[in-house]
Image: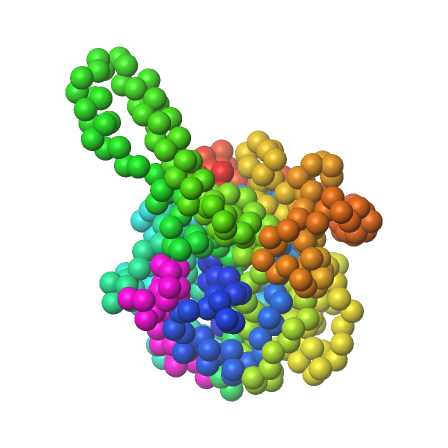
Amino acid sequence: MKKNIFFLTIDGLRADKFEGNDKSSITPNLDSLRKKGSYFSQGISCADGTTLSLNAIFTSKFPFRTGTRAKEVYMDSSNFIHVLKNNGYHIYGVIPDLTSLSRFRFSFENNVNSFRGTPPNIEHMWEGTGKKILNLFEKDKMRKPWFCYIHPMDLHDPLVVPEEFNDEKFGKSKYEKILSSIDEWIGQTIKKIDFSNTLIILTADHGSIIPEGDVGYTDLEPEMKTELKIGKKIMPKSTHKFGAKMIMGVKNRIRDSRLKQANKGLTAYQIRSRLSHTTLLLNEEIVHVPLIFAGVGTPKNKIIPELVRTVDIFPTILDIIDIDYSILEDRDGRSLVPMFEDKKLPELPAYFNTIAHKEITLDDKVGIRTSKYKYFRHLNDQEKEINLYDLENDPQENINIASENPDIVKEMEKILEDFTKNSVTEEEKLTEEEEKIVEAQLKDLGYI
């Protein structure tokens, strides 16, 4: 009998806030799930944005092979959903109602399969999304064998803490209080799953910026509502646009001054934490994500410290459920099943890039990571924005050692070049109208 598959990606979930000394949230259900399965403590995402990350997960190909400027999750023959369908699986899910995910939703057999996913009006688990998910797991709602995919966005900016969790006992920051609230819904869902006949995978598309002291970029901005109101009254209407621009300039200068003062004495990691959530980053807080395999075919209470990539997820799934994927075209991922059996696999570097701006800027970056080093630089120029970090001695990436280690930079650049020599520029598959909608939604989400 074929095994069911429950696949959960929590948008913006960081590895260091899922497990470890830096975690202050209360997550008994997530903790229990980790102990019931195998936890890869060094799981690495390949992008800082959802679309590129999901494309990589569901095709087992890095973004340079699916298109680094892709604006939708592709559902062509390279997507593993087709492999599951061809092997008799019924596909279900509840995901954001973003246009970039629309073709993905079309593959779901359940009619109630989405929730509001555009800020600032994201529908959170406690506002209805959780009940939509739980409803799927009612008896006989899903035909067996089923693959069910869930992607909650409660940890996406702007962060909204449910009233009953707005207490320090649930976490030191808004982020961790929300994670505590998500845990409750995950617990209710997992109780409905038969672990003996279901493979459960939990990971994230990417991580998040969590501001130091829970005081972020926007918290330091003066409101200046009174000034704007008075300005509109006393200034001629023809000058309102200029006046608003002038007040915004003053507002930004005040914010930047406050930010400079607030950041005194902080580490590079702490200063970075106060950047706008729209900032493109490839640091550990963004690319280091949790990865759990639990249920059928997985050992319990196992921690696997070796470097793995999210492109490895689906080859592992298919290996566990005994579906042959070797006939498919080459993939960048590999099965991690040997690691469940304590067999050593040679380390493969992780590749990642930022989700591209509409026009390339210095923020657009590409890089690779080994278990020892993190290297990234400008997307199109290997001489610009060079970053190199010793992860073993500097896990928070406070000290850029690139200038003192040209040989290591050269070595990492060679690995990166070998990775990307077969890169492609994927043609957009969206209609002109869809393109406009996606760009508007990506802007709301902070990606462009």
| The stretch drawn in magenta includes residue 182 | yes
Q: How is the image coloured?
A: rainbow
154 to 319, vertically: above or below: above
Identify which residue is drawn at 28% across, 36% down.
Answer: 223
In the image, 251 versus 259, the foreground residue is 259
- Judged by its main secondary structure, the magenta piece is helix
Inspect the magenta stretch and tell me whether residue 159 lies in it: no
77 left or right of 123 in image: right
Name the residue located 55 percent from the left edge and 34 percent from the top edge: 358
Eyeballing the image, is 200 above or below 78? below
Q: The N terminus lies in which quarter of the figure? A: bottom right
Residue drawn at point x = 31 percent, y = 49 percent:
121
Q: Is residue 375 left or right of residue 172?
A: right
Q: Provide the residue span drawn in magenta.
A: 167-194
Which residue is found at the position 20% from the left and 31% from the top? Answer: 226
Residue 448 in the image: x percent, y percent? 49, 38
Residue 349 visible, this orientation: yes
x, y (%) of residue 388? 69, 50
x and y percentages locating residue 345 in the rendered image: 76, 72
- Residue at the outermost front position: 265
Looking at the image, the residue that sits furthest to the left is: 233
Tell me if residue 58 can be seen. Answer: no
x and y, in percent, of residue 182 in the image: 37, 67
Q: How many marks?
A: 0
Quarter of the figure with residue 305: bottom right
Q: Is residue 70 left or right of residue 391?
A: left
